Amino acid sequence: MNKKVAFYTLGCKLNFSETSSIGRIFKDAGYETTPFNSQADVYVINTCSVTDHADKKCRKVVKEALKHSPNAYITIVGCYAQLKPKEIAEIPGVDMVLGAAEKFNIIEHINDLTKQAKTIIHNAPIDQTNQFVSAFSIGDRTRTFLKVQDGCDYSCTFCTIPLARGASRSGKIEDIVRQAEEIAASGVKEIVLTGVNIGDFGVRDGKRQDKFLDLVKALDHVKGIDRIRISSIEPNLLANEIIEFVAQSERFVPHFHMPLQAGNNKVLAQMRRRYKRELYAERVAKIRSLMPNCCIGVDVIVGFPGETREDFIDTYNFINEMDISYLHVFSYSERENTIAAQMEGAVPGAQRSDRSKMLHILSEKKRRAFYESQLGEVGEVLFESDVKDGYMHGFSKNYVKVRTPYDPLLVNEIVPVKFVTLTESGEVEIEELPQVLTH
C-alpha cells in the first residue's frame, strides 16, 4: 500500500506553485496525495515569512496535522524554514526542517520516516541557493501559477525575501514555454506568471541573459492557453514596451498588479524603493491611455518607521487621486535582520491599525468604482468550479469578479457576458450572451 502525503501552504502564489511541484515529486516516488484534514504518513508544510505570526501559524498547522495522524512525519519547508530553522525545530512534533536549497530534494531527505529524538535540520546558507528550480501548480483546471523567476537582488529595508530565497535567478525561456505548452495540454485556460521579482526575469548564473519582455513575447505564441496574467511587477521594471505589448496582445490580459508601498517620496526613500511616486503615476497614466478598462492593483504598507500622520495622508491622497482598481494593504511589522527593524520612529500599533482601516475603506471604494465603470460593458468571463449559496464565480480578463447561478456546463468555460448590476457583496451580476466561446 502506498504511503500517503498531505500538504499545507502558507503565503504567496509562488509558494502554491512550489507546493504543487513538490507534490509531483512525491507522486513520482510512489506516494499518494491525501487532503490535509485526513490521515497521512507525511505532512509537508510550506511556510511564509512575509505575513505576520509565522511561528504561531506554523505551530497551529503542525498541531492540526498531528491531530489527524499522531505518528506522522512532519516536514517544514519555505521561507520561514530558511530564516528560522532552529525556532521551528523547537515546535513539538516537527521531524525535519528543509531550507531553500534542500526543499526540492525532499524525497532524498525523508526516505527513512523513522522519527528521531531531535529534529533534523538541512539548511545551507542562502548564498548557496543559486539554482533556479521550475514549478507550476496543477489541480485547479481553470488557472495555473507558473514560476518564472526566484529570489531578489533588491535591498528594500523592510524585506526578508533576499535572506529567505537568495539572489535573483530565472529559468530559460524555451523551458518556460515548454512548461506552458504542457499546462495548455492539461486543459487549463489561464496561466498566472509568478516569481519574487518577475520584472527582473532573465538572470542566469549571475548574468543577465534575457529580459522579461522577451519571455512575454515568447509566451504570447503558446497555443491552447487563452489567458496569461502577470501576477505582480515592480513599477520601475514595468517598461512602456511591456505595457504597449500587453495592450495589443490577445493572450496577455489587461490587469497589472504593481506594488507602490508608499505614496510619499520620503518614505519610499527610507524603504529603499527604486522609484519615486512620480514614476508610479506615469506608469498608471500610460496603462490607462492604452487600456482604459485595465484593472490596476496596488500594494501599500502602512506604519513604516518614521511615517508621520502627514506622510500617511500624503500616501492616502496620492492613491485616492489615481485611477487604480483595488489595494492590498499591509501593516508594517518588524522583521529580524532588516534595516527597518533598527530604524527610529516606530509607529504605535493602534495607529498602524487605523491607517490600515482607512486604506481598506479606500480600496473598497476604488473597487466598487472600477466595477461600476464596467456595468453595461461586454466581456469574457472564465468560470470556476466553486459554488457558494447556489452561485458560481468567475473573472473577466480585467479581473472583474462576477457571479451567476451554478451551471456545471460553465465550469472552465470562457463565456461572453454583459456586466449588469453590482451586488451588495461587491460582485457583478451578469447577463449571459447567446454564444459560448470555444477556443
Image (tube, helix red, strand yellow):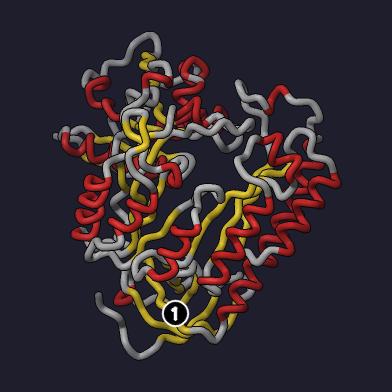
- Which of the pair 173/342 is nearer the observer? 173
Residue 38 appearing in the image: no
Q: Horizontally, is 264 left or right of 184 in the view?
A: right
Q: Where is residue 175 in the image (x, y as percent from the top left)?
A: 23, 45
Residue 27 appearing in the image: yes
Question: Which element carries disc 1, helix, strand or loop?
Answer: strand
Q: Where is residue 202 in the image (x, y as percent from the top left)?
A: 36, 41
Q: What residue type is labelled 1?
A: Gly
Residue occupying image coordinates x 47% and y 62%? 243
The residue tagged 1 is 379
Residue occupying image coordinates x 45% and y 71%? 396
Q: Horizontally, is 285 left or right of 182 in the view?
A: right
Quarter of the image where the N terminus is located: top left
Q: Position of residue 298 (x, y in %)?
A: 60, 55
- Which of the pair 82/24 is nearer the observer? 82
Quarter of the image where the C terminus is located: bottom left
**Occupied quadrant, residue 408:** bottom left
**Occupied quadrant, residue 265:** top right
Q: Would you call the spot at circle 1 few (<14 residues within 10 Å), some (14-19), or many (20 or more)?
A: some
Residue farthest toward the bottom in the current orientation of the protein: 434
Residue occupying image coordinates x 28% and y 26%? 106
Q: Horizontally, is 145 left or right of 332 in the view?
A: left
